[in-house]
Image: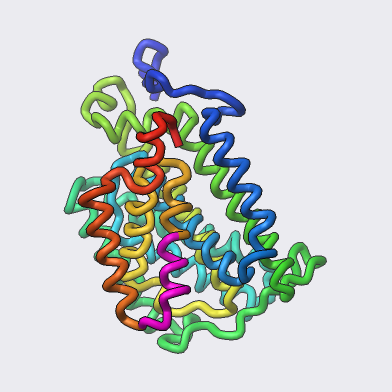
Amino acid sequence: MASETTAGAIPTSAGEEQGIWGYSRAQFVALIVLAGILVVGPYFLYPVFLMKLLCFALFACAFNLLIGYVGLLSFGHAAYFGMGGYIAGYTAKAWGFTPEVAILAGAAIAAAQGAVFGWIAIRRQGIYFAMITLAMAQMVYFFCVQAPFTGGEDGIQAIPRGHLFGLIDLHDDMAMYWFVAAVFLIGFLLVHRIIHSPYGQVLKAIRENEPRATSLGYRTDDYKLVAFILSAMLAGVAGGVKSLVFGIATLTDVHWSMSGEVVLMTLVGGLGTVFGPVIGAAVIVAMQNYLAEMGAWVTVIQGGIFVICVLAFRRGIIGEIANLLRVKL
């Protein structure tokens, strides 16, 4: 990338206020509110429900890094989420890994998957890219059906939460909640740092006009591949944490419908916004939890919300709020 001189650098978008620690004022206030909710949340809501919400929020943030800031629509992110859960669960149960090491193992395998699948997929664009990612994710699904270590249709059950760093017992829901909240916050801040770094500015330039970014000397395929790997890694972290929270890793997490759910979460919250995926995940997970007694109608309601968002709120919940207040979220 020797040709990337100052003259050819991608500038920060006009009007993109840096504010405090790289956050705009609106983003900083929203971050404080989010941190406050994380602190008081378990005292008002069921901690296990909140942990599920945070796992999916991190998953949606990982997916949004790829589609919202690079413009790559992956229909196969369940492969990394589910495999991260399987690896974390298996290493914790069979090999006795501590929770943090098990999650890192799941993230490493998910990142390796992302490197291989991304290297293949980024050579195509648009619907072809989406279909390739879906096809490879289905290959992972059928592998998980047959592989001995996954337990097939029974999954990996009775996964122990273990002791964090060998000291803190995570079998207590509150202790586990603080661990999950910390993992989510670290992942969320990492995503924010990525998209507001010089590397993130190049990603946005690729999203807006890839031929122009290429003409400026940027090896766009390399940038896209790194973004794909980072997104897969964070999805693996989310899947690994979820398997430890619930003590089970199943085919549901690697099924194509899970890829559809994370697309829905991101679109409902707001594509290309920092806080949108968190809100989208909260909406979808809350619907699944509180409308569970309606059975299959939950899926119908989700579809209805998706249609409404596409027709009336094309920027998503956070996107529309940010547009209304004329701030950046």
Does the magenta portion include 256?
no
Out of 21 and 43, give the one closest to the viewer. Answer: 43
User: Does 307 sit above or below residue 142?
Assistant: above
**Start-end of magenta stretch:** 283-294
Farthest residue toward the bottom? 154
Quarter of the image that includes the C terminus: top left
Q: Main secondary structure of the magenta part?
A: helix
Quarter of the image that includes the N terminus: top left
Residue ID at (55%, 69%): 242
Farthest residue toward the right? 167
Residue 31 quadrant: top right
Residue 322 position in % (x across, y down): 40, 36
Residue 174 position in % (x across, y down): 72, 68
User: Does 62 sit above or below residue 257?
Assistant: above
How many marks the image carries: the answer is 0
Residue 65 position in % (x across, y down): 41, 45
Question: Is 52 displayed left or right of 119 in the figure?
Answer: right
Question: Is 29 displayed left or right of 197 in the figure?
Answer: right
Does the magenta portion include 291?
yes
Residue ID at (32%, 61%): 76
Residue 187 position in % (x across, y down): 56, 49
Farthest residue toward the left? 127
Question: Is 190 displayed left or right of 110 in the figure?
Answer: right
Residue ID at (29%, 35%): 207
